[in-house]
């Protein structure tokens, strides 16, 4: 089978969940067969970013110093090879050099001046705004199958809001929407499998660290199995 014929599935967490919804609403080509929307969050800037209203005046004072800094200039003009050398010097944080990742990082650095200038000039809200996103998804979302995942402890989760927005739309296109609530927090999908090196003697600290690691990873594994099982059931 040609790889192009394989079904497409997408998973997004928090702001990434919002991006998946927008992709499924703005584009009509290669629509995913299913979306897994985890810990959906799309709040106004004043709620999503603490002290956001104070950032503009702060940037207006800091930007001239940043732009005059040779470090800032070097960061903007650094090539992929330069970034690779920097990461290698930092201790090999990136084990395998990824040209695409370096390109994305360079584009991110290029966007910083524009973003900072907008904030400095008084931009105080995301564009499109949360209400605009909800309205657009309500009328244009085209992914037939959507799994909404909410965690038991998550003060910034907006899953109920997006469920109310998407359910009529998904049903109108003959699809299905399902919501599950799992044990965990907003950061559960971000938990990393950190390697804990036990010393020559197994101490209570080792036991505690490994116990906490196992507990945290267990919630992440449940999340992975839940999404994978749901994809397989379609």
Image (cartoon, rainbow, N blue to C red):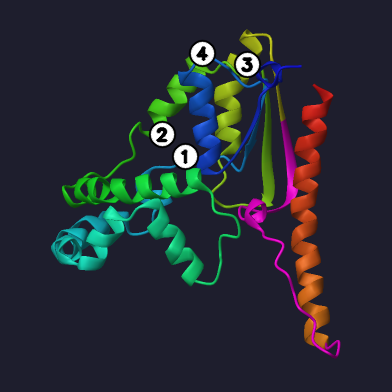
Give the number of the mark in front: 4 or 2.
4
Q: CA distance from mark 4 to mark 2?
A: 22 Å
Q: Earlier in the sequence, mark 2 or mark 3?
A: 2
Residue 63: x and y in percent read 18, 60
- Point 75% across, 74% down: residue: 196
Which SS class for mark 3?
helix
What residue sits right under mark 2 in the picture?
130
What residue sits right under mark 1 in the picture?
42
Which SS class for mark 2?
helix
Q: CA distance from mark 3 to mark 4?
A: 15 Å
Residue 115 lies left or right of residue 171; in this view the side is left
Residue 51: x and y in percent read 33, 59
Which SS class for mark 4?
loop
- Point 54% across, 18% down: residue: 141
- Point 57% across, 52% down: residue: 155
Q: CA distance from mark 3 to mark 1?
A: 20 Å
* Camera-side residue of 220 and 149: 220
What residue sits right under mark 4 in the picture?
28
Residue 59: x and y in percent read 21, 59
Residue 197 on the magenta span = yes
Residue 229 picture quarter: top right
Q: Residues within 10 Å of mark 3 (few under 14, many from 20)?
A: many
Residue 143: x and y in percent read 61, 19
Q: Earlier in the sequence, mark 3 or mark 1?
A: 1
* Camera-side residue of 167 and 22: 22
Helix, strand or loop: magenta stretch: loop
């Amino acid at each position: 089978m040609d790889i192009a014929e394989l079904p497409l599935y997408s998973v997004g967490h928090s702001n990434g969940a919002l991006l998946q919804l927008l992709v499924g609403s703005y584009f009509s080509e290669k629509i995913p067969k299913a979306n897994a929307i985890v810990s959906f969050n799309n709040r106004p800037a004043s709620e999503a970013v603490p002290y956001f209203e104070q950032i503009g005046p702060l940037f207006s004072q800091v930007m001239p110093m940043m732009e005059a800094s040779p470090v800032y200039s070097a960061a903007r003009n650094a090539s992929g090879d330069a970034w690779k050398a920097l990461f290698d010097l930092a201790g090999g944080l990136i084990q395998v050099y990824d040209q695409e990742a370096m390109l994305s990082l360079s584009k991110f650095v290029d966007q910083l001046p524009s973003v900072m200038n907008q904030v400095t000039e008084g931009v105080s809200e995301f564009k499109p705004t949360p209400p605009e996103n909800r309205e657009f998804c309500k009328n244009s979302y085209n992914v037939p199958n959507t799994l909404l995942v909410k965690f038991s402890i998550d003060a910034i989760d907006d899953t109920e809001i997006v469920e109310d927005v998407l359910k009529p739309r998904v049903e109108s296109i003959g699809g299905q929407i399902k919501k599950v609530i799992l044990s965990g927090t907003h950061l559960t999908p971000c938990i990393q499998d950190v390697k804990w090196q036990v010393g020559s003697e197994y101490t209570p600290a080792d036991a505690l660290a490994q116990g906490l690691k196992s507990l945290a990873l267990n919630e992440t594994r449940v999340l992975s199995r839940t999404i994978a099982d749901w994809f397989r059931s379609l």
